[in-house]
Image (tube, helix red, strand yellow):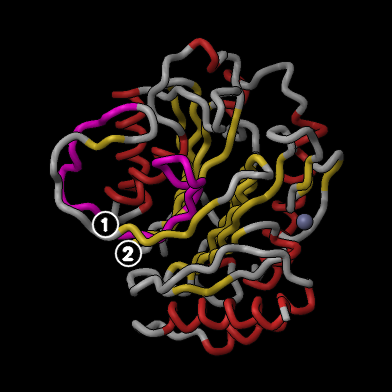
């Protein structure tokens, strides 16, 4: 599951493009926030399940949020100011019949590493999709492969990409756009949506909530954060997700991102309703990210307000931000 949204600069309170995602994953799976430095081409690139052709040039550095066992990432922002996130979608094409290939998370990482604009990321990702295809479980243990849709944005443009196997469609974002766990590009939706998928119950309430936040222009960082922390939806399939279940079956939001392009990229680990968005300067030393722990919402709000007030785009900030998060957690532990 997942929810992604973006608002281009003319629609936002700060006058810069906003990109956001809640990453909904197995509730017991940890994610790590990492900086991937630019690197030179040294041969085929080993992704989660397959090798792909070498990078055509040096990779672009980025900060991403990665489920610990995957090569790919759920979402990230690169040094050129491109943000990408993906979503699980199902279509009439059964993904269980396909051999391991690229996963949606692999494509997010490859887009971040190889594209300096959102439009270029669409070209790179769809070319890789056509060449290598999609396949293989996105959840550890080999169950339930799925297709992906993507939201890709930079300071001046954004695109939605929806896929089914090696087929895809892309749509430019005119002003604001939200995606969730269903096809939404009209022609692609009509041709590919799985008739049995319960989108009205489990997906559309979240998508409608995202659209409502975007419709209330100007769209602010505070409004988007509050949305990602909200529990609109049913049966646990809420924007900040809490689907109960046996071990390995429960699903939850385990990471989130609210990025300004350009501007701070606010990464969060764990449940947004009990965690903190840490504003980070992409392209600077990352410092030492702190593993997530539950925070009282009031403590998280205070910590977050302080981080927002003091954010600085310099080489020292990211380490300082993590130091403050660590200090807040130690204070609570006492
Ligand atoms: Zn929650």
Quarter of the figure that contains the N terminus = top right
Q: Is residue 39 left or right of residue 232?
A: left
Quarter where residue 176 is shown: bottom right
**Closest to the observer: 278 or 124?**
278
Whether the magenta-drawn stretch holds residue 72 is answered as: yes
Residue 224 seen anywhere in this rendered image of the structure: no
Report helix, strand or loop for mark 2: loop
Judging by the rendered image, the residue that carries numbered circle 1 is 60
Residue 303's place in the image compared with 190, above or below, is below
Q: Where does residue 138 sit, x and y in percent of width and height? A: 52, 32
Q: Give the magenta-colored segment's residue range.
A: 50-75
Q: Which residue is mark 2?
A: 79
Considering only vertical position in the picture, is 307 above or below 53?
Answer: below
Task: Please say if the residues under marks 1 and 2 sit with CB atoms less than 8 Å apart.
Answer: yes
Task: Give the structural element (helix, strand or loop) at label 1.
Answer: loop
Determine the quadrant in which ligand 1 lies: bottom right
Question: Ligand 1: does it lie within 8 Å of the C-beta at label 1?
Answer: no
């Amino acid at each position: 599951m997942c929810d992604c949204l973006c608002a281009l600069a003319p629609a936002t309170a700060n006058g810069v493009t906003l990109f956001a995602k809640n990453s909904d994953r197995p509730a017991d799976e940890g994610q790590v926030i990492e900086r991937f430095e630019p690197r030179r081409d040294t041969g085929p690139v080993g992704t989660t399940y397959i090798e792909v052709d070498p990078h055509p040039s040096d990779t672009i550095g980025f900060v991403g949020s990665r489920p610990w066992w995957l090569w790919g990432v759920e979402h990230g922002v690169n040094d050129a100011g491109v943000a990408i996130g993906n979503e699980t979608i199902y279509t009439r094409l059964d993904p269980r019949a396909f051999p391991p290939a690229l996963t949606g998370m692999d494509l997010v990482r490859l887009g971040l590493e190889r594209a300096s604009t959102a439009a270029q990321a669409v070209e790179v990702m769809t070319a890789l999709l056509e060449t290598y295809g999609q396949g293989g479980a996105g959840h550890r243990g080999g169950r339930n492969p799925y297709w992906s849709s993507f939201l890709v944005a930079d300071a001046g443009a954004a695109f939605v990409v929806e896929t089914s196997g090696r087929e895809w469609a892309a749509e430019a974002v005119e002003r604001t756009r939200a995606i969730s766990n269903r096809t939404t590009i009209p022609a692609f939706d009509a041709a590919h949506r799985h008739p049995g998928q319960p989108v009205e119950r489990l997906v559309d309430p979240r998508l409608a909530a995202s659209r409502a936040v975007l419709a209330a222009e100007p769209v602010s960082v505070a409004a988007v954060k509050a949305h990602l922390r909200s529990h609109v939806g049913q049966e646990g399939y809420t924007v900040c997700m809490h689907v109960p279940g046996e071990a390995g079956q429960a699903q939850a939001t385990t990471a989130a991102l609210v990025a300004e392009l350009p501007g701070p990229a606010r990464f969060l680990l764990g449940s947004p309703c009990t965690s903190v968005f840490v504003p980070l300067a992409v392209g600077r030393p990352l410092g030492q990210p702190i593993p997530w722990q539950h925070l009282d919402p009031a403590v998280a709000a205070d910590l977050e307000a302080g981080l927002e007030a003091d954010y600085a785009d310099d080489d020292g900030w990211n380490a300082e931000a993590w130091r403050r998060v660590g200090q807040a957690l130690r204070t609570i532990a006492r």
